[in-house]
Amino acid sequence: MERSQFFGIGLAGVALAVVQPVQAQSLQTVDVQIVAGDRNLTIQLQGSIEPLTPLPATTDGNTLLIEIPNAQLRSPQTQENPTADIAAVEITQSDRGSILVRVVGAAAVPIATTAPTPQGLQIEIAAAPLAEPPPALSTPPTSSTTAIDLLAPAENAIRIIATGDRTSYRIGESSVGTRTDTDILNVPQSIQVIPEQVIEEQGARSLGETARNTAGVTTGRISSGSLATEFVIRGFATENILRNGLRDTTQQFATGITNVDRLEILRGPASVLFGQGSLGGTVNIVTEIPLDEPTYELEYLIGQDDLHRGSIDFSSPFSPDSDLGFRLNMAYESSGSFREFEESNFLFIAPTVTLINTADTTLIADLEYLNVRSSGTASELPALGTVVDSPFGSIDRTTNLGEPSLSESRSNLTRLGYRIDHRLSDDWRIRNEFLAAFSDVGENTGVIPVSVLADGRSLRRVLTRNPSTNTSITFNTNVVGQFSTGSIDHELLFGVELFSDSLRDQIDIINVATIDLFDPEYSGVAGNLLERQDTRTSRNAIGFYLQDQISLSDELILVLGGRFDVANLNFENLLRETDSFESQATAFSPRVGLVFKPEENLSFYASFTRSFEPVAGREQLFDPVTNTTAFGQPFEPERGVQYEIGVKADFDDRLSATLALYQLDRSNVTTTGAESAFTTVQVGEQRSRGVELSVTGELTDGWNLIASYAYTDAQITADNTFEVGNRLPNTPEHAASLWTTYEIQSGDLEGLGFGIGLFFQGERQGNLTNTFTLPGFLRTDATVFYRRDRFRASVNLQNLFDVEYYEGSRDNTDARVVVGAPFTISGQIAWEF
């Protein structure tokens, strides 16, 4: 379909739907405030409400547990000894999509009554008389844990509803920084969370498109629109991608975002918690879980270049009275591309099941299946004629310099796992998690550029056939507990993690005729075989980790942690056995952090941490004359050290900001060689220094923003091949992003919203030799959306002013520059029933 014909199809229907009024109110995230009196305690919850039956609750000893289903807590709250009769109150977000209110009585189980307020719900807590059964119980308990109903008149009984979209971008806590659900203010490293609402409002279709909301993070050598995933964070490429906190090496091949709840980005090393990993940062993908109430949503997306995507999101308990349930996310997409001849489609299926759901134990199992097909792919152009002037003119960004009839890819990815969380007591809990991921790239054939010949217009190319299989298995168990030593409070985490990864990688490199950059003609014929590689790489590791978050006082938190890893690497060259080898690496990765909180909503922090990452394979030296590759010494593990200081602030629990200054030092770095895309060497040492600022949240009712700025000075500090002082590729010195939306809150136009995004990247070097530069750019996106009750529609405009820009450069050569997409428009409609 021609790009201009898009306006005559589905977008007109979207535009008409946008102006149709639907009367209902938007759903909201829940705010909580604890107010302690002399004898009683009041818990105030602010959120959208409607009448319902009394809230369910349970008792366990002197503890009263209240669960508010389908609710998203803005920020957790905890108070110790708020009154003489109440020992503790804790309000947290559960893993099953509800809010847990836990109140511990000093001598007996407390009683609770509820009443609606103009803002939401109020729960009054008081101590029960010791001589009487707790009035909160409908009958005397026959066991230590008995289901009860809170006392409240039927007309006053309510529930909190938050099954729809959040109305604020701010998320107050994250697990990626400490492996426990911790207030981000209390974590001595920089963290940014991108919620599902941002993904939805921007019309993002990949993790790469989502990551542009974080300055200092780029997709580097991969197009941001690709399902394949690789990030550059603080100047360093990282494949350290987690799924619900567990490592998954198949994410680099393809990842769907249909079931993503949020993206958590931890800047800097994370080996102290997650073991071997890249220095620059860690990306944790948090997926959606079953809801406590039936929710069924259908969505359809249409856009330029024959883009069509249909998706469903179904969630329901197994029966009206069941605490167990399921969620099913499915999507099918087919599309062309702004580049000639490219086509792709994928099928995504992701069921999730809650198998155990009690006050003490939850068990969630999930599965993902992703089938991807593409043809005609050739996403890179040489630097000459794009970012470097050519006497013959400029290469059009829609040009395909591959061989469309020879390029085809098909892959299947399956991920399955579970996570079980069990409360051992009021203060201790144990968690066990498992993830197995399988990638089968049965066909991966494409033509890639190698170099421009001396005439300045002929491009040398090769055809690569690169089928592969990858298996990644992670098994993690940890225990979290709270205790005190005198006046000092501790939150202790200790655990063990097993990781196994196996990659079979086959590459045939075949000669293909040259092509004219400015007047391409396709031969459709492959030439002679230049080289064949067939390797198997296996990694097995075990890690033991310990962390203590020590509250020395109300203002001072000391975070101490360490992890010891043993990693075994087995590299097999199946065509040349003499190049095979085995190696073992051990490492201790510490972190020391200090958080000072002069106010509850303000923290200053400093931290020191180290990382390590075993590197598979040996040095590979490609000789272009003989077209052969020689293998050198096995790679040493990469090592990294980071120093970071910063300040974090919350403003009225609506807006969060983080300012960080850091220095990262990296050694034993592995890169592609300057002379050939098939050469791999360890170049020495690199350093990144920088400043980062991020702001996320709600400025006022209906007005949200997520903004960031990054200054990054990343360069080579020691090397035998490249010049010291050269800047690292794909890393702008200055980068900034802003996405902001406003939704009308009342009146006839309630639910109508507008958004605009500005994404800036400064100049970047295209390779380690710094022989060419990718120019800076400012890209503008916009959206118009309408949502009310069960209906949602939107129109998204990406690259509104059709700016020509370049996202990155691949494999450290001047022949593979990744071109950014031109102006694109899309529209979608969603209906919940």
Image (spheres, rainbow, N blue to C red):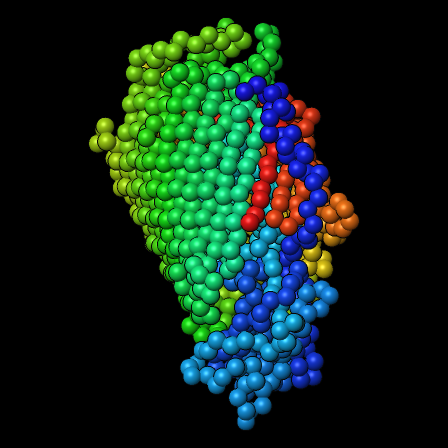
Q: Residue at x 46, y 52 (%)?
A: 327
Q: Residue furthest bottom?
A: 131
Q: Position of residue 54 (x, y in %)?
A: 58, 72
**Where 710 sits versus 123, above or below?**
above
**Where 76 sits versus 703, above or below?**
below
Is there any visible trace of residue 349 in the rendered image?
Answer: yes
Q: Position of residue 712 (x, y in %)?
A: 61, 39
Quadrant of the frame with the N terminus? top right
Of residues 140 and 673, the one nearer the viewer is 140
Corner quadrant of residue 823: top right
Q: Residue at x 37, y 33 (%)?
A: 411
Of residues 325 and 450, the one nearer the viewer is 325
Q: Residue at x 66, y 24 (%)?
A: 803
Q: Position of residue 206 (x, y in %)?
A: 52, 37
Q: Residue at x 35, y 32 (%)?
A: 441
Q: Residue furthest left?
A: 577
Of residues 343 and 323, the one nearer the viewer is 323
Image position of 748 (left or right of 271): right
Q: How many marks?
A: 0
Corner quadrant of residue 301: top right
Corner quadrant of residue 389: top right
Q: Position of residue 139 (x, y in %)?
A: 49, 84
Of residues 689 and 101, the one nearer the viewer is 101
Is there any visible trace of residue 676 in the rendered image?
Answer: no
